[in-house]
Image (spheres, rainbow, N blue to C red):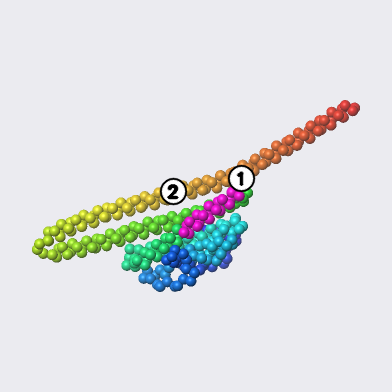
Amino acid sequence: MSFQDVGRPGAGPSQRRSPQRPSVPPSSRGGWDKNPRPAAPSSGAFSSAAEAGGGVGRGPAAADGMQGAGGGVGWGSSGGLGGYEQVSDSIVQYQRNVTLLEKMARSVGTKNDTSVLQTQYNLQIDVIQQLGERIENQLRSQESRLTTLSRTEASSLRTTHVKLSRDYRLVEQQFKNLQLDVKRKRGNAEAMQRDAARMEVEEGGRRQNGVGGEDMTAEGIRWQMQIQEDKINEEIMREREEEIKSIHKGMHQVNEIYKDLAHLVDGQQEGIDQIETQMENAQENTATGLRHIEKANESSQSQCVIS
């Protein structure tokens, strides 16, 4: 079962929802156009930065009237599994937008890396960040709802909460790694452009004769030194990015361990509560038995006095 189906009891392939309608990109005023015009096709083959059926836009209203990402994601009045189903839908939309961003990233550093693609890439980053904030708020709200439920109900929903949180963190880490990869590719592309420009300057210096030839040779040496320095800096940046990825991976593993421990503690606490309840019942039964013994003793003493 994928995380799309978490919180949907009995949901099968034929019962899954149809794809959400594509959202509209934000207008230049910072809001959302009510009557958007179709975007002209770009050279990078990306028609919108909020495509893939999951962009942030105005969709159908949710159960409580709150409008959500691409499909009215909001909190239902009933909470419980219904609330987690909405969180699952938001994570699906988050994954779709990250997948679209990954497609855009494939063109970074190539001949299709135009200003249009860069604008669409930045817009898609904003869309994903907005969806991420929404999911964070939904998870926090659902976490607070668990505290209002009985321990048995909260324990049954805790597994779903941990599963959805883990799924979201995995996609979030994919999003962060993708941003680092794009940054590295653009840095390499810029370095290649600088190298090409320097080679042209050096070639022009070699073709020149007479006065100024030695100056151009010295300039070429300086260009070569600068190229080597840039390559060293790029290697240092690449190593630092690998270290950052390793740190993020370690933090994610630690978070998973803490979540699993919290789940185990909840299960053990439920068993402790049951033992405590049984001890209280035994204590009450013992007290009742003592009262019956005292009454029997008093009754036997009164019979002895009468006799």
How far, Cα to Cα, is label 2 from label 1?
29 Å
The secondary structure type at the circle numbered 2 is: helix
The part of the chain drawn in magenta is 130-148
Asked which quadrant contains residue 27, the reply is bottom left
Which residue is the extreme one toward the right? 307
**Quarter of the image where the C terminus is located:** top right
Q: Percent from the top left, x then y, of residue 240? A: 34, 51
* Circle 2: residue type: Met
Q: What is the x, y in percent for residue 42?
A: 38, 71
The overriding secondary structure of the stretch rendered in magenta is helix
Would residue 152 be visible to someone looking at this image?
Answer: no
User: Where does residue 38 sit, x and y in percent of width and height?
Assistant: 44, 73
Classed neighbour count for the residue bearing mark 2: other residues with Cα under 10 Å, few (<14), some (14–19), many (≥20): few
Q: Is residue 93 left or right of residue 276?
A: left
Residue 214 falls in which quadrant of the image? bottom left
Residue 239 in the figure: left or right of residue 6: left
Label 1, on which residue? 270
- Pick the residue in front: 56 or 277: 56
Q: Is residue 187 visible?
A: yes
The circle on residue 251 is: 2
- The image shows residue 238, relative to residue 45, as above or below, that is above
Q: Residue at x 40, y 68 (%)?
A: 46
